[in-house]
Image (cartoon, coloured by chain):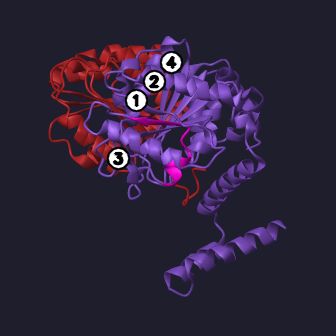
Chain colours: A purple, B red
Amino acid sequence: MTDRPAAAAGGKLLERLLDGEPAALAKAITLIENAGTGAAQVLAGIQSRLGHALVIGVTGPPGAGKSTLVSALVGELRRRGKSLGILAVDPSSPLSGGAILGDRIRMAEHACDSGVFVRSLATRGHVGGLSSATARVVDLMDAAGKDVVIVETVGAGQSDVEVAQLADVTVVVCAPGLGDEIQAIKAGILEIADVLVVNKADLPNAERTVTQLQGMLSLRGPGTATVPVIATTATEGRGVTELSDAVEARAEALGGSARAARTLAQIRLQIADSAAELLRRQLNDSDDDGLHALCRSVQRGELDLENAARQYLSGYLGNKA
Amino acid sequence: MSDSTKSISPPPRVLVTKIGLDGHDRGSRIVAAYLRDAGMEVIYTAPWQKIEAVVKLAVEEDVDVIGVSSLATDHLLLPDLMAALGEAGFGHVKVVAGGIIPDGDEAELLRAGVSRVFHPGSPREDIVATVGDLATQARAACANG
C-alpha cells in the first residue's frame, strides 16, 4: 500500500478523477471494487470534495420497472440541466461468482450522452440489495462532479433497505399485478421510502394499488414525513415530471446533503460494514496455520461455524489488543 | 496479490454486444451465459449498438474484453471499433468476434487488431479460456500503460 510508484499512480488517477475525466472515474471504480493498490489513497483524496451530488436510491421488487423508470428519470433530469452518474446493481451468481449485468438495456436512450455515466456493479456475494463497494463508488461519482447520482438496487425483497443509508432520497417502486403488491413492499422497504412510485400505471388495478399504499401510509404515526405516492408509466414517460418534482422537493426539504447529516449511529454501522469487509478479505487471503486448522476442524464436524469464527476472532483481536 | 493461492482475483469484466443492423442475438446470449457461468461479469446489451455507444460503455464499465457477435456482415465495422477504442485511450481492451465470418474477412479483422475470431462450432471451453486469458492480458497491459 505504501510503495512509491503505486502512490504516484494513485495520485495521478485522483487528479484526473477530480477533473471529471470519465476514464479516470471508471478506473477508480475498478480500483475501489477490487480493493486494489492505491484504493485507500484515492478514497482519502476525495474526502474534501464530497457532498455536492444529490444521491437518489431506487429500489423495489424485481420486474417493477426500476431500470426503465431510472432511464425516464434520467431523461427528465437531463432536461433540467443535471449531469448524472448511475450505479446499476445486479446479482452475482452465488455458485459461479459470474453475473449478467443487463440494466443498461433499458437505458439505451442515453447510450451516447456524455452527461450520463452508467456503471454496472455485481453484488459479489453481498446481500442487502447493493454491492459492498457501492457507497464508496457513490463517493467517487460525487467527487467527479456529478450533480445527481442514482443508485438502482437489485430487485429487492422485503428487507433490502441498505440503499436508504447512502441515498439522500429513496424512491421505492412497485407495480400493480405482481401478485400481492402490498406483500412485496411491506415492513422495511416501505419504511425507507421518501417517495413511493406505482409504475406501470396503465395496467388494471393501478389505482387500487395507489389507494392501498396511501392507506398504509396513513397508518403511520404523527411526526413522520409525508410520503407522496406517484403513479408513473415509465415506458411512456408519464408521471416522470411529477416524480422529479417530488424528488427535488424532498432534497430541498433536507437542506443540502442528507448524507452530511448522517447520525453517529449510522456512521458507526458503516464503519462496521467496512471493517467486516476488510476482515473478510484478510481472512480469505491469510496463510495463517491456525485458520487452516479451524477449517479442518469444521470439516471434520468437531467445531461449528459460529465457534470457529469466535475462536479466530479472539485470536485475531487478542493479537491486536 | 498474484502470489496468493487463496485470493480469487477479481472477475474479468466482459462486454457482449452486437453492432450494426442485424438483430439475431441467440449467439450472443449463449456466449454471455457461458462467460457468466465461468465466473465472469458480463455486461450485456441489446443488438444494434452504435460504435460510439460501445466505446462509451467500454470506458464506463472498464471492461477487459469486448465480444462482438456478427451473423450478417456487421463484423466489417470492427476495424472502425478498434480505431475508436484506440482514440478513447482504451486500446488495451481486447476484442473478439464470433459468428458467421468468412475466412477472407478473418485475416482483415486480425490485422485491424481483433484478437480472435470464433466460428460456428467453437467449443465452449475454447471461448471461455480464450476470453479469460485475454482479460488477464488486457489488465496487465493497462497496469503497465
Q: Chain of mark 2?
A: A
Q: Mark 4 is on which residue type?
A: Leu
Q: Magenta span covers which residues?
A: A187-198
Q: Quadrant of residue A194?
A: top right
Residue at x 74%, y 38% (from the top left corner): A261
How far is mark 4 from mark 2, CA to CA? Answer: 6 Å
Between A193 and B145, the residue placed more toward the observer is: A193
Q: Are marks 4 and 2 in contact (CB under 8 Å)?
A: yes
Q: Chain of mark 4?
A: A
Q: Mark 1 is on which residue type?
A: Leu
Between A87 and A191, the residue placed more toward the observer is: A191
Q: Is residue A12 left or right of residue A83?
A: right
How far is mark 3 from mark 2, CA to CA? Answer: 30 Å
How far from the left and from the top, in percent, is residue A94?
41, 57
Residue tagged 4: A77
| SS class, disc 4 | helix
Residue at x 33%, y 45% (from the top left corner): B35
Label 4 crowd (10 A; few <14 / some 14-19 / many >=20):
many
How far is mark 4 from mark 1, CA to CA? Answer: 12 Å
Location of the C terminus of chain A by quadrant is bottom right
Residue at x 36%, y 42% (from the top left corner): A209
Q: Chain of mark 3?
A: B
